[in-house]
Image (cartoon, rainbow, N blue to C red):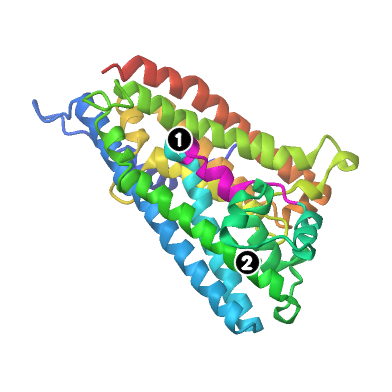
Amino acid sequence: MKRILYTTMAVAVLFAACNKKKDTTPGTEVPFTEMEQTVLNDFTNKVAISGYSDLKNKADALYTTLNTLNTSTTDDNLNAARAAWKDLRTTWEQCEGFLFGPVEDNDYDPNMDTWPTDYHQMDSLLASGNGLTQSDIQAATLSLRGFHPVEYIIFGVGGSRTAAEITARQKQYMISLAADVQNTCHALYDSWAGAGNFAQKVTTAGNGSDKYAHKQEVYLAMIGAMTDICGEVGEGKMKEPFGTSVATADSNIVESPYSGNSTLDFKNNIIGLKNVYMGIGDGKGLCYLVASKNKDLDNRIQNQINTAIAAFDNITLPYGQAIYTQRTQVQHTMDALEALKGTLEGDLTTFAKQYITD
């Protein structure tokens, strides 16, 4: 794996959030247990709830643009629908950086984002006399539900769909799919910030939470989710279609194949992981804790996260093509993800078990 070298100024900028000089005046150092609580509060409010709020709002926007496309099936409206779909995917893929809690427990993830899809299967459904209402969609196999069937209808194979080609059955399917995604995104948000109040279970970990008796438990869940997304991207989404050679590569099992959005999806997954580790805006992430006890580990994790994110930019073709003609770039990216995953499931997990003991 190529190691990235940074100038002194670049290092200062890169690590500013977790490298602030401590006030050494007696009595001014923040207790570690207080830092732990700050990170849980900021993760909950500035990463998770903020991300899921953005998700439901963008699901609403997609539903609106698809209804406009349904009413007036022009190429301009089709392009607007495609942009709304990609915008929603950006937020969702970043939210996959913290897949624990209701998103797993209530099957929100597979209900929206099962892949790969088979467009022949979708064409068979559309050619049949089967119902295409929202309740029909909710009862269908998961590969016929969620983001990717919408993607197929508005992009088509190879992204070649025109507005004039969209049939009445496809429109009906599209609207039911969008309503289903919209409902799932709202339910996911409500599970954290509404009646489900999972946010309270996280912020009161170790202090009355009925989910996490100790803070260490929720921190290990966060780190486990970060580790899992590295594995899902590197060992699943990327490696499975990559195969072991050009001869065994298979573009038919690439995620987001119709829009050509696959590599950006993968990159956003790791950006979501970075948001958990670094925090968003003025929020404190896991690095706040790690840097206070083990600056070398914090520097290594930050370097590995940024190296992995930057590696995606070297894949310049749609992923379904890159697995055949940019195999070196793909392999380097998978190597970077493997290195990051190893540190997260190894040293970062050990750190949490050693220092987060309340």
The mark lying in front, picked from 2 and 1, is 2
Q: Secondary structure at mark 2?
A: helix
Observer-nearest of 221 and 209: 209
Left or right of 201 in this view: 301: right
From this view, report whether residue 37 is shown above or below residue 322: above
State the image quarter where residue 83 is shown. Answer: bottom right
Residue type for callout 1: Phe
Mark positioned earlier in the residue sequence (2 or 1): 1
Left or right of 22 in this view: 357: right
Dominant SS type (magenta):
helix
From this view, report whether residue 121 is shown above or below residue 39: below
**Is residue 1 in view?**
no
Start-end of magenta stretch: 103-117
State the image quarter where residue 38 is shown. Answer: top left
- Residue sitting at 45 percent across and 21 percent down? 349
Q: Where is mark 2, residue-wise?
A: 174
Q: Position of residue 20 (x, y in %)?
A: 27, 39
Q: Position of residue 239 (x, y in %)?
A: 73, 38
Left or right of 317 in this view: 77: left
Name, please, the residue furthest toward the right: 247
C-alpha separation, residue under disc 2 versus residue under disc 1: 29 Å
Q: Position of residue 48 (x, y in %)?
A: 37, 45
Within 10 Å of disc 1 (Cα), the crowding (few <14, some 14-19, many 20+) is some
Within 10 Å of disc 2 (Cα), the crowding (few <14, some 14-19, many 20+) is many
Residue type for callout 2: Met
Observer-nearest of 144 and 128: 128
From this view, report whether residue 165 is shown above or below residue 356: below
Q: Where is mark 1, residue-wise?
A: 100
Q: Secondary structure at mark 1?
A: loop
From this view, report whether residue 269 is shown above or below residue 58: above
**Is residue 188 in view?**
yes
State the image quarter where residue 157 is shown. Answer: bottom right
